[in-house]
Amino acid sequence: MSLFKKDPGLKSLSNLKSSERRKLYAAICSQYGLSEEALASDGVASLVLPPEVKYAAFKSPHAQGTLYTDLEGVPIWFRTRDSELVPTLFTLWKYPYIVPIVNTHEYVIERLVNGSNLMLPGTIPPFPDDAKRGKVVAVGDYKKPNVAVAVGYCQMDLGGMTEVVGTHGVAVEILHVYQDWLFSMVKGAKIPDKVDVLPTKAPLQEQQPEKETLEQATQQTKEMDITTSLSVEDMDDLFLRATLYSISQDAIEMPISASLFMSGHVYKNFPPVDSNLINIKKTSWKKTAKYLKAMEKEDLLKLKGKGDDVVVVSVNKEHEKVRKFEPYKIRRNKSGEASNKYKDSTELQVTQLYKAHSSASNFLRLLDSSQDYYTLQEIKALVGKYIQTRQLVSKNDPKSITADEPLQRLLKTTTLERAKVVDVLVKQHFSPFYKVSRGEESTKPKKGQVPVVKIVEEMKIGRKVITKIIGMEEFLIDPEEVSSILKVKCSGSTTVANNVQNPKLVEVTVQGPHFKTVQDLLFKQYGLKPTWIEYENKLKKKR
């Protein structure tokens, strides 16, 4: 069925910047294997994409996306939030060699206009070799070579197929067809009798692997679309794309809290975009819980919980939108790793820091260093620099140093093995601190060693076994969130309260012996290391 059977509610058209137009053109050529040089040399580049382009968002009952037009408002290309770039009939009438054409009968075209997809028995072999499943193809009348009457997705590998009599199934899923709303944007438009333009003399670029080509093209178009200010519809579109990406590509361990699902998956799977633009408050849903409930209504996932306290218990990988979703490249930094402000939002970072005593202040001044806190690596670098610039390495034993007066006062000795210098300085003249970070949230440096989360299994009065988790907030873990997850994972009641022994700490209690479940949760979803978890089994003591 055409996406444009009814008025899709097209927003007002805006001019596309020349730089974004170049990105769009490059994306089209990359996606469809067109040679930019050949198109330019043959003077047909403007037939594929005119020099000046306008664009607008649309929203139909079946899809949302972006429509591109020329300066006269003639639609030339479109894409939905689930699709790649698709040429309109008007573009294919100018240059029909962008996509392969599957021919059919005139009476079948009438059915396409009325909303049907192209069924295999209604096609006419032979078929182009590149008419493959998932590819964009045109549908044409066999009496009018190269004249497209519809555009859609090929639903099976047609290349090499010679017989269609007695077959069944959808050959082409129609996206845009003659006489639909998109076609009616151009008053008085008629199907031409023929297309006279010749294909480019130079061969098409060697097709890249399908997935790679699609990723590159999609990445380029996303970069183009989101450099301008984002409307509510654009923001909604980005969030849905990132959710479809997460469901189709990520291994999500469930149940998972709403905040972890968003920060650990959705937010890190946005297409290339300035992360400062991304904000759930700028969507039509305004809140995470409302957004996830909307996704639940779409049957993309299932939730448990009430109000804003919800947990994602499953995702629907068999949903039609998920199955048809084509992954794109998420933004990468120079090292090739996914990069945006949400990338490490669930990745825990605990940094061991050291604060210098007053006894080390003179030594640090000699190095022009006056930081409040140092990492161990920074201290090693400073000491190494000091030893090198002052030439303190022993001539008789390169593994040892001969300390000068400032260093001697700190080490309390004249000679010392070089490998032990930092250890002595840190132990005697620095105090340990630690800092915890999770995404953009971080604590101030706290004095002491990195704390631990205690997991205690014990028996209450009435011989009820419970599991307590104490001190997780030190690692920027929300106890209420953990409580919601464990309620589902352990199929039991949970409570959140202040710890009796230390009221400054919060403890989550869940019914039953669930040490392994809690440990796995802290490891996999919250990034804790085994050394940061302390387990106490009070059940064995009572036996």
Image (cartoon, helix red, strand yellow):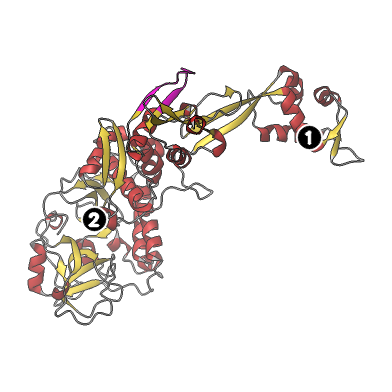
Q: Relative to 331, does residue 282 appear above or below in the rendering? A: above
Q: Residue at x 21, y 46 (%)?
A: 298
In magenta stretch: residue 75? no
Q: Relative to 173, does residue 195 appear above or below in the rendering? A: below
In magenta stretch: residue 497? yes
Across and down, in percent, residue 153 comes to: 24, 64
Residue at the front extreme of this rendering: 543
Residue at numbered disc 1: 420
Q: CA distance from mark 1 to mark 2?
A: 63 Å
Quadrant for the N terminus in the image: bottom left
Residue at numbered disc 2: 320
Q: As rendered, which of 500 and 258 lies closer to the eye? A: 500
Question: Relative to residue 401, is residue 143 drawn left or right?
Answer: left
Q: Which amino acid type corresponds to the residue marked 1 in the rendered image? A: Lys
Question: Relative to residue 528, is residue 259 drawn left or right?
Answer: left
Q: As rendered, which of 144 and 403 lies closer to the eye? A: 403
Q: Residue at x 28, y 57 (%)?
A: 323
- Number of numbered markers: 2
Q: Relative to 457, does residue 255 appear above or below in the rendering? A: below
Identify the element where label 2 is drawn.
Answer: helix
Q: Which residues are magenta?
A: 495-508
Q: Residues within 10 Å of mark 1 (few under 14, many from 20)?
A: few
Q: As rendered, which of 86 and 307 lies closer to the eye? A: 307
